[in-house]
Image (cartoon, rainbow, N blue to C red):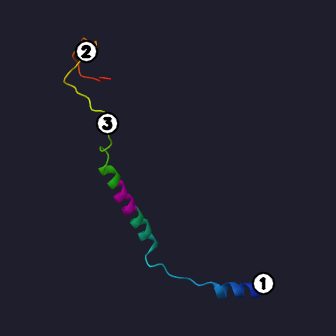
Amino acid sequence: MTHVLLQAAEAGHQVKELPLSPIWYGVITLVIAAALLGLLWSFRNSLALDPVAHDHDDLGAGKGATDKRPGSHH
């Protein structure tokens, strides 16, 4: 019985060769990941963190501040 099952299992088992060597799948994956990281890195300063326009010419004017140091004017 075992012999019949082994023959049936071997008859249905077909091996298909890969088109590339297995190392190249890793190399291609790393290249794609590096390209996507480069694309992400190119947008690193494009986010407007404070979209409200501030006029910095009036340092402390009308705000009750006595020093003329630049800083946050909220």
Residue sitting nearer the eye, 15 or 74: 74
Magenta span has 13? no
**Residues rendered magenta in the picture:** 30-38
Residue sitting nearer the eye, 60 or 34: 60
Around disc 1, counting alpha carbons within 10 Å, would you say few (fewer than 14), some (14 to 19), or many (20 or more)? few
Mark 2 vs mark 1: in front? 2
Question: What's the mark number on residue 62?
Answer: 2
The percent position of residue 10, horizontal first and vertical second, equals: 66, 85
Magenta span has 31? yes
Q: Amino acid at mark 1?
A: Thr
Quadrant position of the N terminus in the picture: bottom right
Residue sitting nearer the eye, 61 or 17: 61
Q: Circle 1 sits on which residue?
A: 2
Task: Measure how far apart labels 3 and 2 are at the Cα level.
Answer: 23 Å
Q: Are marks 2 and 1 in contact (CB under 8 Å)?
A: no
Q: Residue furthest left?
A: 57
Q: Residue furthest right?
A: 1
Q: Amino acid at mark 2?
A: Gly
Quadrant position of the C terminus in the picture: top left
Disc with the residue nearer the chain's start (3 vs 2): 3
The percent position of residue 14, horizontal first and vertical second, equals: 59, 84
Around disc 2, counting alpha carbons within 10 Å, would you say few (fewer than 14), some (14 to 19), or many (20 or more)? few
Q: Is residue 13 left or right of residue 6?
A: left
- Give the secondary structure at mark 3: loop
Residue sitting nearer the eye, 65 or 17: 65
- Give the secondary structure at mark 1: helix
Q: Residue at x 33, y 42 (%)?
A: 47
Question: What's the mark number on residue 51?
Answer: 3
Disc with the residue nearer the chain's start (2 vs 1): 1
Q: Main secondary structure of the magenta part?
A: helix
The percent position of residue 36, horizontal first and vertical second, equals: 36, 57
State which quadrant residue 56 falls in: top left
